[in-house]
């Protein structure tokens, strides 16, 4: 990206970019690339603008290629998806609650949306990311499929 890629950002500003992965099944994933909400932004989550469409395309195509061609990358990616799975984190519910409260204070989410997202949280929380079996609290392995957590 060049210095003019991101509107309203001063040249040479250091950015710590967090990119998230939503993993649905064994080989089905979606990379959620960084977005920002312009000043006076939108009231909807995910309604911001991509930092850079070129960055989005480069990141997604690179991960796709590495998943196909590099077994060690694929294994590391799979481990990261399990190790970083917020649904398996004992503090995950607190992180979720704090995040919702921050978004609500900033006017970026409505109470009805919080309730809807919270229901989704409880639907997926505490389940194996590989086989969707219920997990015992603090489990190191899935009792159904053996996945190391």
Image: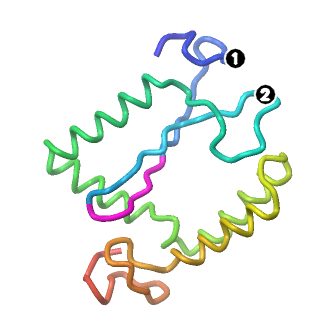
Prevalent SS, magenta region: strand
| Foreground residue among 22 and 94 | 22
Q: Position of residue 143 (x, y in %)?
A: 31, 89
Task: Please state the total of marks drawn on the protein image.
Answer: 2
Mark 1 secondary-structure assignment? loop
Tell me the CA gap for discs 2 and 1: 9 Å
Mark 2 secondary-structure assignment? loop
Relative to 33, residue 127 above or below:
below
The segment highlighted magenta reads: 20-26
In the displayed structure, does residue 132 sit left or right of residue 72? Answer: right
| Foreground residue among 48 and 10 | 48
Point 36% across, 57% down: residue:
80
Quick one: label 1, few (<14), some, or many (20+) residues within 10 Å? few
Q: Position of residue 49 (x, y in %)?
A: 61, 30
Point 51% across, 70% down: residue:
87
Mark seen at residue 39: 2
Relative to 85, residue 148 above or below:
below
Point 56% across, 27% down: residue:
51
Relative to 4, residue 28 above or below:
below
Indicate the quadrant where residue 15 lies. top right
Which quadrant is home to the C terminus?
bottom left
Relative to 34, residue 136 above or below:
below
| Foreground residue among 24 and 143 | 24
**Magenta stretch holds residue 25:** yes
Per the image, the residue denoted by label 1 is 8
Q: Position of residue 4 (x, y in %)?
A: 57, 10
Indicate the quadrant where residue 7 lies. top right
């Amino acid at each position: 990206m060049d210095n003019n890629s991101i509107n309203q950002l001063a040249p040479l500003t250091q950015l710590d970019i967090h990119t998230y992965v939503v993993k649905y099944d064994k080989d089905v994933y979606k990379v959620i690339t960084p977005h920002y909400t312009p000043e006076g932004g939108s009231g909807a989550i995910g309604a911001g603008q991509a930092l850079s469409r070129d960055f989005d395309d480069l990141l997604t195509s690179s991960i796709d290629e590495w998943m196909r061609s590099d077994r060690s990358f694929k294994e590391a990616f799979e481990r990261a998806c399990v190790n970083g799975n917020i649904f398996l984190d004992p503090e995950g519910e607190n992180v979720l609650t704090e995040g919702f409260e921050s978004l609500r204070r900033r006017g970026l989410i409505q109470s009805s949306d919080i309730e809807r997202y919270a229901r989704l949280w409880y639907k997926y929380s505490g389940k194996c990311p590989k086989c969707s079996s219920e997990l015992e609290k603090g489990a190191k392995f899935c009792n159904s499929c053996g996945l190391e957590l």
